[in-house]
């Protein structure tokens, strides 16, 4: 790399202090004396991953990233300013133009659950009070729609609703597995977690040895809960088999699929379980480096996890010799900065590494070329929580609930027009109707019109699917998906066209822009939906276009975002939810008892 | 960081057998599908691929169907495997290629993208159909950035193929003056805070111009002539020569119109330059022609 050319703009004292607080002495260039400078390509590479935390520091210090501030970071980390600017402008939580007034910004969610629950009114109300409002995609609080998140300047970000104690809707239900500690164990106390059986699974895993742990996970039939349902045992064995290079395990806590909030509830209320399970993942795959990549809009979960890590480390449950096993393992937390795409595993790597969160082509797969091009197992926190159950109950015990092909339980995120929105844990095989009933049934006086399964990347189903057993195989057979566990209910009075327009807008806003089918296709799809909204029906040409756009995005995009970008909108069109087609008129069906 | 793979594909002694459109092909392991297609005499459109750059496989115009793959795969970047069954001419492939071309043409100005125009015709792309019923399709439109006398940037022609970024960065120049900024349809090639080129790290090697497939970056000389409707490529001659500034031996191709140099390129397959030059070879040719001489008469 050539010498950097950096403009003359300088950081002020506040910006410097903020960046120094994050970087400490970890700079890519060390000037020992005027003539002895330790620098070079390797040092630059080794420090690049500090770019994202440094940008967070600048944004928080001043409410924006100034040219002087960026220059300072670029000098400390030896990153070319054009690249650092490219990274900063990738994320919604960073701004690179000076705001008129510097201060807290309140992000109000505009995605479906909040859209139909007064988001627009809430925005107007806040703006009238002089609050700076920012329209945000799903904030992962669909159970308290309309959701808000306050991005602060010179202080910690916050979610005001977090000050209320969390009450699990299924509190006290003795059949709970993954959620059983919530509301029982003090999330701030390792001792409380251990008193409830916490860290017994790690001790058991160490006694079993890494191979037996992988075998048990494989035998349990556990599959990934992040959306793709990939068998966890296969992934872990692949990473375990890699030798001779540093290895990583990553908890993918980016949770940005509209309608999804289960991981937040788990992280906030049972953080030690996530830490313990990630430690087991590290032990089973012989990875020494654990990472938690958590979305930037989750301040409470971030704090709880950080504190849990500190306590676990102090107790010898992380560090040089994890629980006396001889295995070295520690965990680092990285905050995202407002980008749905960074939940895609390869985009997540790029984001941690200090590059734009653009997905990479697979193959090669993360198990051989993951974070820093090293072998990596990425898992959703819910997947990890299941591992504790597998170890504690054994694979056979684990399989006692659920179905043959979908063993165990599933966390579902109920939102929209249900009486008691929240996270629910049900055995696989529970029907959709039973799930809705568990959440108190449909709210309001209008009949159920449709349910969105799997989020914006999933699809709508009509009330005639209430008998569907919630399993991977039944969902697939009926042409739908459980995805990340979203179950969002819409009743007859909801303006479904507006919902579909917003879903299309979501993908348009979240496409990373790398590949043509998705960069342009998401825009054209949104334009098609706007046309539908304005004229009440799609023209013949637009209908044909909409099919063509959907096909190329699914066929030729690089990653899952493009592959699924037309899924929900397409299903709404097909089912006649947007005012046309065969499914129209099904409004009165499926009234719940 | 991406390690430069061997962009030309060929790598090893071992041969791999595959079928392309029913035809058996045998190529060295490590070869890309695109190369294998070429070997089989099948022409495949490419846009973001170049022989002197690391594949980024972002444009997706080169996609093919590979049996056993759920989605189409980029032929420019995927290596062949034993027994692979590749189809380049199915309805599915043609549809995706057509849509990619149409998408591009619906959003940016491809008038000067010589290499693409042929494919737009071949795949019957109809970019006009996005612009219907009074709802205009969003396009990338910006005034050309004319910030110095050497070259201009007109991002309303940019297809975001990443080639200039690669040429400016890891693949040639290692200057990193430009990068992709923003996200989605608003992504743009940009300097930091969009400062002008003279204020950026740019060293005016012109390697970005050399790789740009659409004319989004072009010589100021070419830009001025086009503005004056006086750009006549058919009448231009190309003279091969060796740069006289230093001893490296870079090959230059001088493009001459009306006995004046209008742009300078270097062959991408030249062993010394791989198509890349420095400011002297690219722009330092005024000394061979009078600076303010009136344009000479055209030859009869
Ligand atoms: C656009 C996009 C966003 C994603 N977001 C998440 C996410 O927030 N959390 C998650 O666990 N997986 C997400 N995934 C899936 C991950 O790529 C990956 O499959 C998953 O983290 C693997 O963990 P699992 O096997 O435990 O499910 C996303 C995928 C795509 C394409
Ligand atoms: S499909 Fe969309 S999000 Fe994924 S790489 Fe392509 S442009 Fe980016
Ligand atoms: S002229 Fe050279 S240095 Fe300047 S932007 Fe182009 S490739 Fe980079
Ligand atoms: S300016 Fe040219 S080379 Fe650069 S990305 Fe755009 S089209 Fe490609
Ligand atoms: S927080 Fe609003 S839809 Fe999820
Ligand atoms: S040429 Fe293959 S993806 Fe662009």
Image (cartoon, coloured by chain):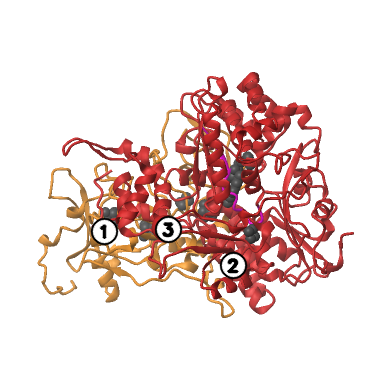
Chain colours: A red, B orange
Which image quarter has ligand 4? bottom left
Q: Position of residue B72 (x, y in %)?
A: 58, 49
Viewer-nearest of discs 1 and 2 = 1
**What residue do we see at 58% from left, 53% from top?**
A561
Q: Position of residue B29 (x, y in %)?
A: 47, 33
Viewer-nearest of discs 2 and 3 = 3
The label shown at residue A89 is: 3
**In this view, A326 is above or below B64:** above
Residue A211 visible from this viewpoint = yes
Q: Quadrant of residue B280?
A: bottom left
Looking at the rendered structure, the secondary structure element under dot 2 is: helix
Where's the N terminus of chain B, which quadrant? Answer: top left
- Do the dots labelled 1 and 3 sit on one chain? yes
Q: Looking at this view, is A529 or A453 the one in front? A: A453
Local packing at callout 2 (Cα closer than 10 Å; few below 14, some 14-19, many 20+) is: many
Give the residues drawn in magenta, as a range.
A248-260
């Amino acid at each position: 790399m050539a010498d950097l050319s950096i403009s003359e703009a300088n950081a002020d004292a506040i910006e410097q202090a903020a960046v120094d607080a994050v970087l400490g002495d970890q700079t890519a260039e060390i000037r020992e004396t005027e003539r002895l400078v330790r620098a070079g390509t390797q040092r630059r590479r080794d420090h690049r991953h500090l770019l994202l935390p440094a940008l967070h520091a600048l944004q928080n210090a001043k409410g924006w990233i100034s040219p002087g501030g960026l220059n300072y970071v670029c000098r400390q980390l030896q990153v070319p300013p054009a690249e650092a600017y490219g990274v900063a402008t990738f994320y919604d939580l960073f701004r690179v133009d000076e705001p008129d007034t510097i201060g807290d910004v309140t992000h109000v969610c505009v995605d479906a659950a909040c859209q139909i629950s007064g988001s627009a009114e809430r925005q107007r109300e806040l703006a009238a009070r002089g609050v700076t409002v920012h329209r945000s995609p799903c904030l992962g609080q669909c159970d308290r729609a309309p959701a808000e998140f306050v991005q602060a300047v010179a202080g910690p970000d916050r979610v005001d609703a977090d000050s209320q104690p969390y009450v699990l809707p299924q509190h006290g239900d003795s059949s709970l597995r993954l959620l059983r500690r919530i509301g029982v164990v003090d999330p701030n106390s390792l001792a409380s977690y251990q008193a409830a059986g916490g860290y017994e699974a790690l001790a058991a895993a160490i006694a079993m040895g890494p191979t037996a742990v992988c075998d048990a996970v494989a035998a349990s039939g556990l599959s990934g809960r992040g959306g793709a349902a990939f068998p966890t045992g296969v992934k872990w064995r692949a990473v375990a088999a890699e030798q001779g290079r540093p290895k990583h395990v990553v908890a993918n806590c980016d949770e940005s699929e509209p309608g999804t909030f289960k991981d937040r509830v788990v992280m906030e209320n049972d953080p030690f379980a996530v830490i313990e399970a990630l430690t087991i993942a590290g032990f089973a795959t012989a990875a020494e480096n654990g990472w938690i990549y958590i979305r930037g809009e989750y301040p409470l979960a971030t704090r709880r996890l950080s504190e849990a890590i500190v306590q676990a480390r102090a107790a010898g449950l992380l560090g040089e010799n994890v629980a006396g096993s001889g295995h070295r393992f520690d965990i680092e937390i990285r905050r995202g900065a407002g980008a749905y795409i960074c939940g895609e595993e390869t985009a997540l790597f790029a984001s941690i590494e200090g590059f734009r969160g653009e997905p990479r082509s697979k193959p090669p797969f993360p198990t051989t070329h993951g974070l820093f091009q090293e072998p990596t197992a990425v898992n959703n926190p819910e997947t990890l929580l299941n591992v504790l159950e597998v170890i504690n109950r054994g694979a056979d015990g684990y399989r006692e609930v659920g179905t043959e092909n979908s063993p165990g339980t599933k966390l579902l995120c109920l939102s929209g027009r249900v009486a008691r929105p929240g996270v629910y844990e049900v055995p696989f095989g529970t029907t959709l109707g039973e799930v809705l009933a568990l959440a108190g049934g449909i709210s309001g006086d209008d009949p159920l019109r449709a349910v969105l399964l799997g989020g914006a990347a999933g699809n709508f189903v009509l009330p005639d699917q209430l008998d569907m057993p919630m399993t991977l195989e039944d969902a697939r057979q009926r042409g739908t998906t459980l995805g990340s566990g979203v179950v969002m209910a819409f009743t007859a009075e909801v303006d479904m066209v507006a919902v579909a327009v917003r879903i299309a807008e979501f993908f348009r806003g979240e496409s990373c822009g790398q590949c043509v089918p998705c960069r342009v296709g998401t825009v054209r799809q949104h334009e098609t939906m706007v046309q539908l909204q304005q004229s009440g029906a799609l023209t013949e040409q637009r209908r044909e276009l909409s099919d063509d756009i959907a096909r190329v995005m699914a066929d030729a995009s690089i990653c899952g975002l493009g592959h699924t970008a037309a899924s929900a909108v397409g299903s709404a069109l097909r089912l006649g939810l947007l005012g046309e087609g065969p499914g129209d008129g099904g409004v009165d069906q499926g009234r719940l008892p | 960081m991406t390690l430069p793979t061997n962009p030309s594909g060929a790598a090893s002694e071992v041969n791999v057998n595959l079928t392309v459109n029913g035809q058996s092909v045998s190529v060295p392991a490590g070869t890309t599908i695109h190369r294998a297609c070429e070997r089989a005499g099948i022409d495949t459109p490419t846009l973001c691929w170049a022989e002197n750059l690391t594949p980024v496989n972002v444009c997706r115009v080169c996609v093919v169907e590979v049996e056993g793959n759920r989605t189409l795969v980029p032929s420019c970047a995927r290596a062949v495997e034993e027994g692979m069954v590749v189809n380049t001419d199915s309805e599915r492939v043609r549809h995706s290629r057509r849509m990619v071309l149409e998408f591009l043409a619906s959003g940016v100005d491809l008038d000067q993208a010589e290499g693409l125009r042929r494919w737009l015709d071949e795949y019957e792309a109809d970019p006009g159909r996005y612009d219907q019923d009074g709802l205009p399709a969003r396009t990338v439109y910006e005034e050309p950035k004319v910030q110095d006398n050497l070259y201009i940037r007109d991002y309303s022609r940019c297809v975001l193929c990443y080639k200039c970024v690669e040429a400016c960065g890891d693949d040639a120049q290692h200057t990193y003056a430009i990068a992709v900024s923003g996200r989605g349809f608003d992504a743009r090639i940009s300097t930091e805070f969009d400062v002008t080129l003279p204020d950026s790290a740019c060293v005016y090697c012109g390697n970005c111009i050399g790789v740009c497939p659409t004319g989004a970056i072009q010589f100021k000389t070419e830009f001025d002539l086009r503005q004056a409707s006086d750009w006549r490529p058919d009448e231009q001659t190309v003279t091969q020569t060796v740069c006289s500034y230093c001893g490296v031996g870079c090959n230059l191709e001088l493009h001459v119109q009306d006995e004046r140099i209008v742009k300078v390129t270097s062959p991408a397959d030249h062993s010394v330059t791989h198509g890349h030059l420095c400011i002297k070879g690219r722009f330092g040719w005024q000394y061979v022609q009078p600076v303010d001489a009136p344009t000479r008469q055209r030859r009869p």
